[in-house]
Image (tube, rainbow, N blue to C red):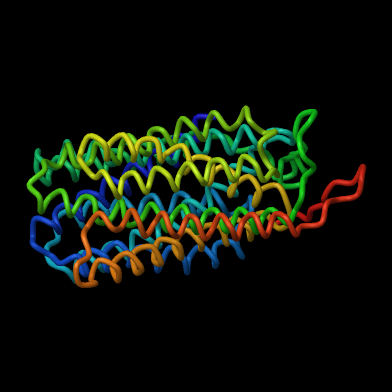
Amino acid sequence: MYTYLCPALMDWACFFLYFAVLYDAGLQGLSTTQCAWIGGGMQVTYMALSLTSGLILNRGNARGLLLTSILLTMGVGAGMLWLHGFVPLLLAMVLIGALMAVFFNAFQAHMRGEAAPGELSRAVGFYTLAWSGGSALGFLTAGWLYAHGRPTMTLFVVGLCLVMLGLLLSHRAKPADAPSVDEHVEEGPAGSREVRPGYVWVGWLMIVTVTFVQRPLFTFFPAFGAKAGVSSFWTGLPLFLHMAVLALGGLALWKCRSWLYRRTPLAVMHVAGILLLLGLWRYPQYGLAAVGLTLLGLYAAFAYFCAVYYSSNSGRRAFNIGVNEFLVGLGSLAGLAVVRWWLARPGAHETDMFLVCAIALGVSLLAQLAEASRLPKPAVGQTARTSTD
């Protein structure tokens, strides 16, 4: 179980770097367009490597790829904190995106191989807690340590990577022929809806939308805060709270397996997200923004948990997760591009990014409900069969 600290530490390191680089970009006076390119560059390689990883990953090679990606992240991450200018920062973020894609796809293959049949919801809950908790700490510590200088930040990133290496090297993996969730379809408790493999498509719509919403916030909020003279700590705090609630909400969903494969919880969580985004658009004051971004973490927790669970419980699991992670990059790029286009319009205001995200979330909700409604129900007594990776 302690290996779940690895995705926590990796996202801690990567979001630490993400915030520090973009806050620094704001101090350097880089334009909103350049900030969007820096944030988007990471997503391009994340998309490409996620699809490739989904095709080649299995229980046998996951551990080696995990170790390699951690070592390279340590080197690239330590170096990029000393870079200045648009092009060097863009290239460094491109490399970080590639390494993150390899790591998170490999870890999910490792996670499924280590989880016994019937433990999928538990594994996804802890995984959601781990990666989102790490992201939250990345925002918080970057906002705090930025004021302590580049040497301190460099040592911090190297330390996180060394701890990850120690955890993996000391872990004894299960035998390759041990039963795992990869060969098993997990049904819910009494009263739950049947497993419907077509919900993988609903999960894909969810994950592309939640990243469409989150990435503009993560990219533009630090730069806007720096340009407005808000300290790095107070700029990062609302993003930390958002990810902290996402982490705890994702873990709590482990106990809510009966919510899955249903349209009503899907609609309720998405409508709540839309209302919060509209509130942020109309009332952007710092205190209200902090509360709104924090509560928005509940919607994000639901979306990520469902997307990972649906992809991991039907069909070709590694390929499904590879598509998931590809869509993380696609949604992030789309969110950055659309919000940047909107903000470039005459008369647009920075807070309009919340309105754009609310509209996108509403359109996606309609698409998800339409997809869920048209899916055929399995015959009574039947469950989906699955192939191994």
Side (left or right) of 259 relative to 96? right
Q: Is residue 184 left or right of residue 92?
A: right
Q: Residue placed at 55% from the left, 29% from the top?
A: 1
Residue 234: image location, x then y, percent: 17, 37
Residue 9: image location, x then y, percent: 38, 39
Please identify the quadrant where the C terminus is shown: bottom right
Q: Which residue is rendered at x = 70% and y = 58% of the image? A: 316
Total numbered circles = 0
Task: Where is residue 253? Give x, y as percent.
Answer: 58, 32
Q: Residue at x 26, y 36 (%)?
A: 288
Q: Nearer the viewer, residue 165 or 14?
A: 14
Q: Quadrant of residue 371?
A: bottom right
Observer-nearest of 378 and 12: 378
Question: Residue 17: x and y, percent?
Answer: 26, 50
In this rendered view, identify the residue nearer to me: 333 or 156: 333
331 in relation to 144, above or below: below
Residue at 25% from the left image edge and 66% from the top image edge: 343
**What is the quadrant of residue 351 in the picture?**
bottom left
